[in-house]
Image (tube, rainbow, N blue to C red):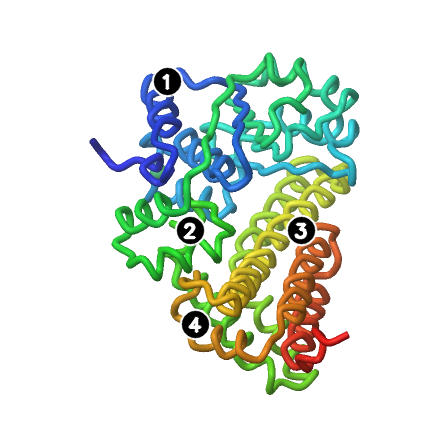
Amino acid sequence: MPASVFDDLVGQERVAGFLRTAVESGSTSHAYLFVGPSGSGKRSAALLLACALVCDDGGCGTCAACARVRRGAHPDVRVVSPAGAKGYLVEQVRDELVPDMWLAPADGHAKIYILERAESLGDAAANAFLKTLEEPPPRVTNILLTDDYDSVIPTITSRCQVVRFSPVPPQRAVALLAEHTGAGEDEALAALAASSGVLPRALEFLRSPARREARDHVLAVLRDLPVMDGRDILVSARDLLREVKAPLDELKERQVAELRERVEFMGKAAQTRDVEQRHKRELTAREREAVLEIVAVVESWMRDVLAASAGAHGVANRDAADDISTAAGCMSQAAIQAGLAGVARARRRVSYNVSPQLAVEVMLFEIQEARTCPRSWESP
Ligand SMILES: [Zn+2]
């Protein structure tokens, strides 16, 4: 069998086989609903299906088009998230999403819309979408994602082909990563920890020198925290963010080009506000993801400290085992819990669109405080 992007859908072989057959037989649906627990790889699968639809070879995984999709920089593949705090807005669907679907693909093959959190399509937004979902413009495929099938409006689910993803147990995840990349157990565990347990993202991690470097950098900052002053922490947070956000430059270039094309095509009458708003949302969502990777590494490290302090064997970040045991030796249970609470707050702040720089700074300060706090935290 020739190489296919679906080979990377590690742990979801049944889904991979199903999608691959659909692509090869030219019988893909124009609307999918991917259902599965958070971390089961729905979003990765949607991107792989997008590769298969825009690629000349049905998803070779290596051509320029496939590579652009995987980097999140393909002009015909959109990841859409709710614009409102409570979900998709009816204006977002009616005035932005649906009209955009009627524009021809930039590369001529196909347009793919990946809608995150399909359960947050409320009645009004769903109504504005139903007709297009059922009969989209030619070459348009909608892939809706949800981890809560029962909360998706039935008029939406009935118009989609439902594809179910199952959770992959951690031990099997490690074995699959080793099998696919030749990574040792230590590396596989670290990759899963840095990817919040999402298997296809862990696979990408093992193949990405930049992401591995960023993780090493986070671990170095955690090791050095006790001897850092306030300025060191601010500089570290800034450097970490710069590192994880570097891959977004390509997306920014794509957005500038899209805006330019629109103005050239439509002249002075061009309405650019909606496009600019969408670009801003896209960028924010990708930035958030990048920042959450820093948070994931910090969280796994703190959990390791907790495990080490409780005398448990085995940590996820084995290459940092010495630093972890040092931290465990000088932190009380209460201090470790305080550090973990700081991480959880950082995660929430990032989700609520607090400046990523601020969220990471505050998290590092809180962990530093927890680490240097006297053990007397435990005494009354
Ligand atoms: Zn390709």
The amino acid on which the numbered mark 2 sits, given as a three-letter code, is Ala
The amino acid on which the numbered mark 4 sits, given as a three-letter code, is Ala
Distance from disc 2 to disc 4, alpha carbons, whole Å, reads 18 Å
Distance from disc 1 to disc 3, alpha carbons, whole Å, reads 35 Å
Question: Horizontal and vertical percent for residue 74?
Answer: 50, 42
Query: Does 60 appear above or below 307?
Result: above
Distance from disc 1 to disc 4, alpha carbons, whole Å, reads 48 Å
* The label number, if any, that marks residue 284 in the structure image: 3
Earlier in the chain: of badge 2 and badge 1, it is 1
Q: Residue at x 55, y 81 (%)?
A: 224
Distance from disc 4 to disc 3, alpha carbons, whole Å, reads 31 Å
Q: Nearer the viewer, mark 2 or mark 1?
A: 2
Tag 3: Cα neighbours inside 10 Å, few (<14), some, or many (≥20)?
A: some
Earlier in the chain: of badge 1 and badge 4, it is 1
Q: Quadrant of the C terminus?
A: bottom right
Earlier in the chain: of badge 1 and badge 3, it is 1
In terms of secondary structure, where does tag 4 sit? helix
In terms of secondary structure, where does tag 2 sit? helix
Query: Does 166 appear above or below 172?
Result: above
